[in-house]
Amino acid sequence: GPKVLQIPSHQIIDMGQMVTLNCDPVSNHLYFYWYKQILGQQMEFLVNFYNGKVMEKSKLFKDQFSVERPDGSYFTLKIQPTALEDSAVYFCASSFPGQGALEVFFGKGTRLTVV
Amino acid sequence: GDQVKQSPSALSLQEGTNSALRCNFSIATTTVQWFLQNPRGSLMNLFYLVPGTKENGRLKSTFNSKESYSTLHIRDAQLEDSGTYFCAADYGGSGNKLIFGTGTLLSVKP
């Protein structure tokens, strides 16, 4: 199926530092998403992004989080500053706009460890 | 939360047997997706459903929007079917937003 690429696969960072997670969505997709999964738990929606703007964000999308996709580059999730509770696997996803709802494809995730 | 309830939470199957997983929705949803998360954490798309039934090999899934549930049937379970199965409801807001269930951890034994 369509591939969403995430870089890096693992990241260890000191608490208080900034981290940027990178995502290369499926090439013709226009909706982009970030989800968070704490080990052993369900996936939780963070934010969706379309046409250069955040469309909706959840309560988990703290003020320290931001997303962007400068033209032709990665869709990124930046956390500044990081906190211990930000440790989780972050999944990027994308979908193609069309009539009705949209099938969403996920990357393999970036495991973030804040120490 | 409890907007998408999955059952059972864990399941152990003998190779070659059949089983069914279920999701109940307490939110209005127009489509459902089923995923398999392997032990390394990668998510594989299994089904994308509007109301109705789809079949793919040994897997069959049904989404009944009127009664707000979806099922995933596994026939002739194989060792490689092991992993965590998630259903997710499309909860339409400003864009697409998937609300995930808590997952069913399936272990297939020889």
Image (tube, coloured by chain):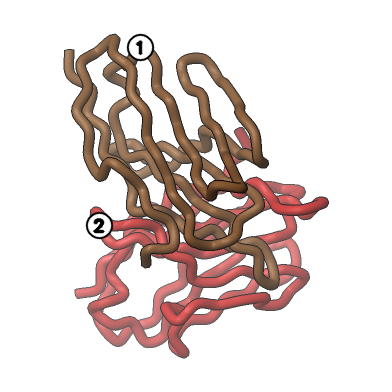
Q: Colour of chain B?
A: brown
Res B3 seen here:
yes
The residue drawn where x is 37% and y is 35% is B21
Tell whether A26 sits left or right of A51.
Answer: left
Q: Amino acid at mark 2?
A: Leu
Dot 2: element: loop
Q: Residue at x 39, y 16 (%)?
A: B75
Viewer can see residue A74: no
* Chain under numbered label 1: B
Quadrant containing the C terminus of chain B is top left
Above or below, comparing residue B73 to residue A38 in the picture? above
Q: Which residue is outermost to the bottom?
A: A63
Residue under numbered circle 1: B76
User: Where does the image place residue A109, in percent across and percent down from the top left?
Assistant: 42, 53
Give the labeled residue for mark 2.
Answer: A39
Q: Residue at x 49, y 53 (%)?
A: A6
Chain letter, colour red: A
Badge 1 marks a residue whose secondary structure is loop
**In front: A81, or B100?**
B100
